[in-house]
Amino acid sequence: MLRVAVVGSGPAGVYAASALTQHGDVAIDVLDRLPCPYGLVRYGVAPDHLKIKSISAALRAVLEHPAVRFLGNVEVGRDVTLAELHDHYDAVLFSSGAAVDRRLDVPGEDLPGSDSATDFVAWYCGHPDAPVDHFTLDARSVAVIGVGNVAVDVTRILAKSADELRSTDVPDHVLEVLQRSQVQDIHMIGRRGPVQAKFTTKELRELGELANADILVDPRELELDEESQRAIGAERALRRNLEVLQEWARRRPEGRPRRIHVRFLLRPVEVLGTTRVSGLRLERTRLDGTGNVTGTGQMCTLDAQLVLRSVGYRGLPVPGMPFSEWTGIIPNSAGRVLRDGVPVPGEYVAGWIKRGPTGVIGTNKNDASETVAALLADAPALPPAPVRDPDALPALLAARGVDVVTWQGWQAIDAAEAALGRAQGRQRVKIAHRAELLRAAAGAGDAALAAPPSAAGSTAAVPT
Ligand SMILES: Cc1cc2nc3c(=O)[nH]c(=O)nc-3n(C[C@H](O)[C@H](O)[C@H](O)COP(=O)(O)OP(=O)(O)OC[C@H]3O[C@@H](n4cnc5c(N)ncnc54)[C@H](O)[C@@H]3O)c2cc1C
Ligand SMILES: NC(=O)c1ccc[n+]([C@@H]2O[C@H](COP(=O)([O-])OP(=O)(O)OC[C@H]3O[C@@H](n4cnc5c(N)ncnc54)[C@H](OP(=O)(O)O)[C@@H]3O)[C@@H](O)[C@H]2O)c1
């Protein structure tokens, strides 16, 4: 039997586990540093995007496959070392995602009131590492830097009323802050032009359909250079984005409580303020004919008491694993980890830590399949792990005082969140505190750690 550890239970890890179950005689442990599975599907996908969130039902089917065992609340590199994983598994597959934000590298970036979208998303999604009191939303004007889909999510959540979000699973403390929110103006700012923006049309369009917010676009910022004209000629999706923006530029505000300003050709130069953020200094840019921009030297100041940097995510190194600081990924060739440029038998990567923080949930399926194909091709030649007792790793973790959350533990958390929701007439309310999650999981008992039997003959395929 092939024994594989998958590190990370986000889409990439679960798709990898799914592909592995099709191999036959295999036992897979999926480890996650969080007590709950699903990675960014639970802690990134916006709470009001219920249809996308429902992909977790398909991911659940994989984690309930008899060959798969979930070991939550176990951080590789802290609770267990890479060398120990090699002792217990024939192969280790890292799908640990990209958990932190990229930086702007402008003065004032670290002032109180200048935060990353990563932290804001983690806060409204009830991530156990996000301090519950981090955001107060007493800012009247918010600048969201970046025009990708995360910026669109963040802008929409800021623009919606608490009542519009009551039907979602946002934790109680988030709903309370949203209820008291003082936000009136949200400026979503792109450093390049409308055609170079990264958002997709479906997500963009939602910003113009909000009951609680008017949308404002300056038509002068939609003027195209030759390169942009060529790009919209070649790509329908870009043309559709532009059409949406052009329609908004013709709209007149209707006096809704909030206003979304979609801005282009402005790059942040400095976050202003002495003790906390009071504004943002921006430089007008000009497209240079290649899709990039140059500064014009023309400066302006935007009034803002909260700045959210939504300029992309970045992977974190895992102790013992190679890591490229330059690209923020684990160096690999088609999923085989490279050490000094040479593939290491038995070490693999999938998802955002393999290719960088781009792509939707479904993108991770082919990505994970490629990695699993490499792993299975190498499998016959992999030296077997010395420790083959499936109870040995849980015993090691227990001896270290690690409070492992089993699948049954997660189901207990799931039930507790549903019960919290029922009590408030909501479908579910997320538990944000790690201690409370662990308390909810505790009812599940130790029997849950029983080793998974062999999966010969059965597979768990995940639809995307
Ligand atoms: C804010 C946001 C919203 C998004 N919304 C959508 C959307 O609506 N639709 C869509 O299709 N795509 C969306 N995406 C993209 C999608 O979420 C990603 O493509 C996908 O989650 C990447 O999968 P992954 O498994 O590589 O990483 P992740 O989902 O981040 O999973 C990584 C997992 O590894 C765990 N982990 C990390 N380090 C360790 C460690 N040392 N030990 C153990 N476990 C560890 C983490 O806890 C996490 O559970 C969104 C992305 C973001 C950032
Ligand atoms: N609903 C969904 O399907 C959904 C929701 C959320 C996320 N996602 C996916 O998750 C992935 C990550 O999304 P993301 O929004 O974090 O990243 P992204 O799509 O890469 O967008 C990042 C944005 O930040 C800008 N930026 C980068 N550095 C900057 C700087 N120094 N100054 C100013 N602006 C800067 C980029 O502009 P430049 O282009 O000029 O670099 C871009 O507009 C994407 O693939 C996205 O599609 C999908």
Image (cartoon, grey):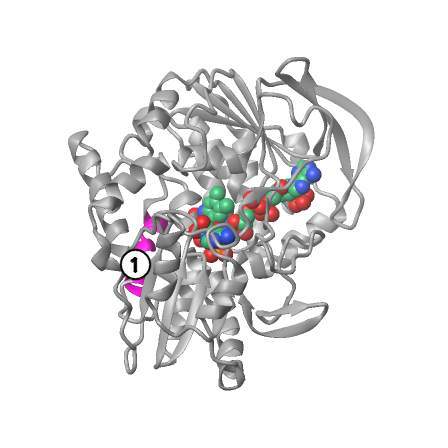
**Does residue 87 appear in the picture of this structure?**
yes
Where disc 1 sits, the SS reads helix
Front-most of 6 and 214? Answer: 6
Which residue is pictured at 16% across the width and 31% down the height?
423
Q: Residue 213 appears at what percent x and percent y?
A: 43, 25
User: In x, y percent, where is residue 245?
Assistant: 55, 38
- Inspect the image, locate mark 1, and give the three-letter code of the amino acid beneath it: Arg
- Name the spot of residue 143 as percent of width and height, x first: 58, 26
Q: Nearer the viewer, residue 121 or 280?
A: 121
Q: Is residue 59 magenta?
A: yes
The residue positioned 26% from the left and 39% from the top of the image is 439
Q: Position of residue 313 (x, y in %)?
A: 58, 45
Count of numbered tags: 1
Give the position of the C terminus as an image quadrant: bottom left
Q: Is residue 249 above or below residue 193?
A: above
Q: Is residue 198 left or right of residue 326?
A: left
Examine the rendering and report whether any part of residue 242 can be seen. no
Residue 334 found in image quarter: bottom right
In this rendering, the answer to whether 439 lies above or below 362 is above
Is the CB–ligand 1 distance for label 1 below 8 Å?
A: no
Quick check: 58 left or right of 76?
Answer: left
Residue that extends furthest to the right in the rendered view of this protein: 297
Which residue corresponds to the image point at 82% horizontal and 31% vertical from the top-left? Answer: 296
Residue range corresponding to the magenta coloring:
51-63
Q: Residues within 10 Å of mark 1 (few under 14, many from 20)?
A: some
Give the vertical position of 393 relative to 200 (above or below).
below
Residue on which disc 1 sits? 60
Asked if residue 95 is among those painted magenta in the image, a careful observer would answer no
Q: Depth check: 379 or 177 in front?
A: 379
Q: Main secondary structure of the magenta part?
A: helix
Q: Quadrant of the N terminus?
A: bottom left
Instruction: Answer with the quarter of the image where residue 57 lies.
Output: bottom left
